[in-house]
C-alpha cells in the first residue's frame, strides 16, 4: 500500500524518519528532528534563492511553468485579458470571487473617490531632484502614505484593511503620474472622476491645456490589459518582499513599498526598461546575430528572456505581442520592433536558448508598447508597479489572515570563523 510520506535514512546515525507529504511538499521543519548527536541543532534545508521552497500556501494565482499556464483565482489569464477589466481583476484577486454588477460599481466608485493625494505628499514629491528615477520616488511615496494614514497599523480590523486596500489601488496611479510630471517639470494634473482607471491615469500623465482630456480608446484599453497581465504572479521577488515585511506587522504602505523596491531591479520589473536599452544598443536587425553571440559567450543577458518558473513561452508575452500590433496600428511605427522580432526569431531557434528553456517573458514586448504610447523608459517599471498592486495587496491580505503566518525569519548556514578572543588594537 502506498503512503503519502517520505522515508529518509540519516546515514550519520543510521536512523530512519518518516516525513508526511502534504500538497506535494514536506515541511522543512520536520528535518529538525534529524540530529547527528545530542548537541546538534537538527538538519536544515539550504535553499538560497528559494529555488525549491514553498514559503506559503496560497489560493490566489496558479502557474504551470512547463505548460505556460497562468490563472488568477482559477480564471485563465487569456479569458481575463479578453473579457475583463483591471478593476474587476483587482476585485477578483483581493476578494477571491468575481464581483456582481453592483459590487463592481461600488468598487469602482470607492477607488475613483480615493485617487487624490494629500497636498503635503505633493510637496514631498516636489523635493526630489528633477531627474529622480520614478521608481525610487514611488518607493518613497508609497511608504510616505503610511505617515498620512497611521490608523493603517490596525491590521486586525477588516474594515480598516479594506480602506487601505482601496486607498492603495486608487492613489498608486496618481503617485506614478505625479512622479512622471515632476521629471518633466510640468504642473501636476489632478484625477478626473469621469474617466476609467486607465483613462484617468493617461489624463494625469498627458493633460495639457484642454478643458477635458479624452484618452485614445485603443491606448486606454491596451493599458488596462497590460495592468491585468501584470496583476499577480504568485511568489515572485517583490511579492516575497511584501510578505516578508508584512509578516513583521508593518503597515500595508510600508510593506508594499518593499514590493516596489524589489520590483525596481533589472532582473525583475526593471527588465522592461532594460529591454529597450538593449534594443537601442543593438540598433538594427543586422547587428542581432552579433548580439546573440555576445550573450552566448556570457558577456550579457538577453533581457526580457527567461524566467524562474516559465520553461515555456510566457502566456503573458503571447497576449502582449498581439496587443502590440493593436497599439502600433494607432501609434507611430516603432523602429525597435523589427530588432525585437529578429532577436526573438533567432533566439527561439538557437540551441543555447532552447537547451536552457529561455523564452520571451512579459517584459520583452511590454516596453515597446509603453514606448509607442509615449512613456519614457524610466516610467516602464512604475507601470508594472501599478499593475502588480492588487497582487501585492491580495498576497499581503492572505498572509495577514493566514493562521500559520509567523514573522519571516530564515535560518543561515554559518561558514565564518569559530569563536575567538578579541585582540586589542595595539596588539594587531
Ligand atoms: N539571457 C541569457 N542567458 C540566460 C538568460 C537570459 N536572459 N536567463 C538565463 N540565462 C541562462 C543563465 O546564464 C544560465 O545558464 P548556465 O546554466 O549556462 O549558467 C541559465 O540560463 C539559467 O539561468 P539562471 O540565472 O540560473 O535562472 P534564474 O531562474 O535564476 O533566473 C531570470 C531567471 C528571469 C532572473 C533570468 O532568466 C534573467 O536574468 N532574465 C533576464 C531578465 C528578465 O527578463 N527578467 C524579467 C523576468 S519576467 C518579469 C518578472 O517576473 O519580473
Image: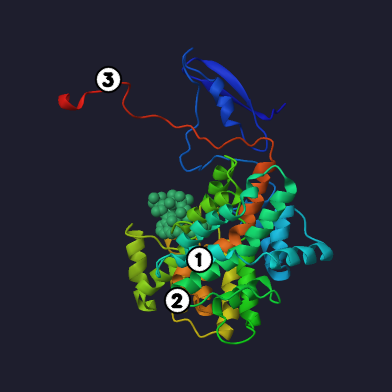
Answer with left or right where residue 133 lies relative to residue 361: left
Q: Which residue is mark 2?
A: 185
Residue occupying the point 32% across, 21% down: 419
Beta carbon of the mark 1 residue lies under 8 A of ligand 1 = no
Q: Nearer the observer, disc 1 or disc 3?
A: 1
Secondary-structure class at tag 3: loop
Secondary-structure class at tag 2: loop
Disc 1 crowd, CA 10 A, few/some/many (<14, 14-19, 20+): few
Q: Which residue is mark 3?
A: 421
Give the quadrant of residue 145.
Answer: bottom right
Find residue 128 and report its horizontal and vertical position in percent: 43, 65
Q: Nearer the observer, disc 2 or disc 3?
A: 2
Residue occupying the point 33% across, 29% down: 416
Q: Quick check: which quadrant has ligand 1? A: bottom left
Q: Nearer the viewer, residue 142 or 353?
A: 142
- Closer to the chain start, of discs 2 and 3, is 2
Give the Cα separation between the discs numbered 1 and 3: 53 Å
- Toward the bottom, the furthest residue is 210
Residue occupying the point 58% across, 48% down: 235
Q: Nearer the viewer, residue 206 or 152?
A: 152
Say which quadrant the C terminus sits in. Answer: top left
Is mark 2 in CB contact (under 8 Å) with mark 1?
no
- Closer to the chain start, of discs 2 and 1, is 1
Q: Which residue is mark 1?
A: 123
Find residue 156 and report its horizontal and vertical position in percent: 70, 42
Find residue 197 and report its horizontal and vertical position in percent: 66, 70
Disc 3 crowd, CA 10 A, few/some/many (<14, 14-19, 20+): few
Amino acid at each position: 500500500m502506498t503512503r503519502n510520506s517520505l522515508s529518509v535514512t540519516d546515514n550519520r546515525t543510521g536512523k530512519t524518519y518518516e516525513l508526511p507529504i502534504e500538497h506535494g511538499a514536506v515541511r522543512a521543519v520536520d528535518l529538525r528532528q534529524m540530529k547527528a548527536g545530542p548537541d546538534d541543532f537538527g538538519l536544515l534545508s539550504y535553499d538560497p534563492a528559494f529555488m525549491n521552497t514553498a514559503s506559503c500556501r496560497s489560493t490566489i494565482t496558479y502557474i504551470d511553468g512547463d505548460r505556460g499556464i497562468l490563472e488568477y483565482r482559477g480564471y485563465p489569464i487569456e479569458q481575463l485579458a479578453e473579457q475583463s477589466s483591471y478593476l474587476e481583476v483587482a476585485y477578483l484577486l483581493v476578494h477571491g470571487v468575481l464581483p456582481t454588477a453592483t459590487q463592481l460599481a461600488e468598487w469602482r466608485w470607492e477607488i475613483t473617490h480615493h485617487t487624490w493625494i494629500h497636498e503635503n505628499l505633493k510637496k514631498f514629491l516636489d523635493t526630489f531632484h528633477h531627474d529622480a528615477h520614478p521608481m525610487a520616488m514611488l518607493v518613497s511615496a508609497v511608504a510616505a502614505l503610511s505617515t498620512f494614514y497611521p490608523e493603517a497599523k490596525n491590521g486586525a480590523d477588516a474594515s480598516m484593511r479594506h480602506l487601505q486596500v482601496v486607498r492603495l489601488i486608487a492613489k498608486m496611479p496618481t503617485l506614478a503620474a505625479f512622479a512622471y510630471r515632476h521629471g518633466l517639470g510640468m504642473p501636476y494634473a489632478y484625477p478626473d472622476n469621469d474617466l476609467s482607471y486607465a483613462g484617468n491615469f493617461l489624463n494625469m500623465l498627458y493633460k495639457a491645456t484642454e478643458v477635458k482630456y479624452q484618452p485614445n480608446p485603443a491606448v486606454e484599453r491596451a493599458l488596462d490589459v497590460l495592468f491585468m497581465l501584470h496583476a499577480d504572479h504568485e511568489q515572485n521577488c517583490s511579492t516575497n518582499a511584501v510578505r516578508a515585511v508584512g509578516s513583521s506587522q508593518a503597515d500595508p504602505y510600508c510593506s508594499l513599498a518593499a514590493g516596489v523596491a524589489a520590483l525596481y531591479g533589472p532582473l525583475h520589473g526593471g527588465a522592461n526598461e532594460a529591454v529597450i536599452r538593449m534594443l537601442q544598443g543593438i540598433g538594427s536587425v543586422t547587428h542581432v546575430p552579433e548580439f546573440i553571440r555576445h550573450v552566448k559567450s556570457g558577456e550579457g543577458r538577453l533581457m526580457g528572456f527567461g524566467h524562474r518558473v516559465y520553461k515555456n513561452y510566457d502566456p503573458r508575452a503571447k497576449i502582449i505581442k498581439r496587443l502590440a500590433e493593436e497599439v502600433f496600428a494607432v501609434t507611430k511605427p516603432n523602429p525597435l520592433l523589427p530588432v525585437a522580432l529578429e532577436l526573438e526569431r533567432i533566439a527561439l531557434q538557437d540551441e543555447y536558448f532552447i537547451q536552457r528553456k529561455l523564452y520571451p517573458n512579459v517584459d520583452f514586448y511590454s516596453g515597446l508598447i509603453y514606448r509607442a504610447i509615449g512613456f519614457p523608459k524610466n516610467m516602464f517599471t512604475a507601470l508594472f508597479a501599478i499593475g502588480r498592486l492588487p497582487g501585492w495587496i491580495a498576497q499581503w491580505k492572505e498572509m495577514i489572515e493566514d493562521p500559520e503566518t509567523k514573522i519571516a525569519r530564515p535560518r543561515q548556514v554559518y561558514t565564518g570563523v569559530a569563536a575567538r578572543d578579541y585582540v586589542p588594537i595595539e596588539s594587531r
